[in-house]
Amino acid sequence: MYQRALQGYEKAWGAEHTSTLNTVNNLGLLYVDQGKLAEAEQMYQRALQGYEKARGPEHTSTLDTVNNLGLLYAAQGKLAEAEQMYQRALQGYEKAWGAEHTSTLNTVNNLGLLYVD
């Protein structure tokens, strides 16, 4: 279904439209659930590049994808890359939402789990 939506959005609005990028990010989530980690990384990287261009590096949609990349890298055992993504997301969320927002706290938790492992 996401592939169908993605094709439609790309045709209607183009590859860089934020609705298209949302679907790209969601497709990355689906690929993670399916264990298709290489495909998930491609989708997340595409979404990240598009969000950075369309909304900027500190927009919360961009940060959500950064955090998703952190989760993916942690699952792949790429701990340094995961930490870098989590730190970036954490700094952005703290600036955008504050220290007590759930997105900020979820990222703090992700970092904690990374350090425990």
Image (tube, rainbow, N blue to C red):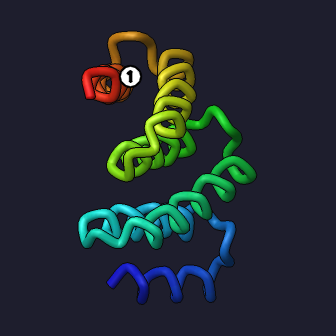
Image quarter for residue 49? bottom right
Rendered location of residue 102, percent (x, y)? 29, 24
Relative to 94, residue 65 above or below: below
In-front residue for pair 22/33: 33
Rendered location of residue 90, percent (x, y)? 48, 23
- Tell me the residue at 38%/22% (across/down): 104
Image quarter for residue 47? bottom right
Q: In which quadrant will I find the C terminus?
A: top left
Q: Which residue is mark 1?
A: 104
Rendered location of residue 100, percent (x, y)? 33, 12
- Tell me the residue at 67%/46% (across/down): 55
Relative to 81, residue 49 above or below: below
Amino acid type shown at disc 1: Thr
Specify the farthest residue to the top.
99
Q: Is residue 102 left or right of residue 80?
A: left
Relative to 111, residue 60 above or below: below
Rendered location of residue 92, percent (x, y)? 56, 25
- Tell me the residue at 59%/37% (across/down): 59
- Tell me the residue at 55%/64% (across/down): 21
Considering the numbered disc 1 on the image, is that residue within a helix, a strand or a loop? helix
In-front residue for pair 88/112: 112
In-front residue for pair 38/5: 38
Crowd class of label 1 (few under 14; some 14 to 19; many from 20; radius 10 Å)? many
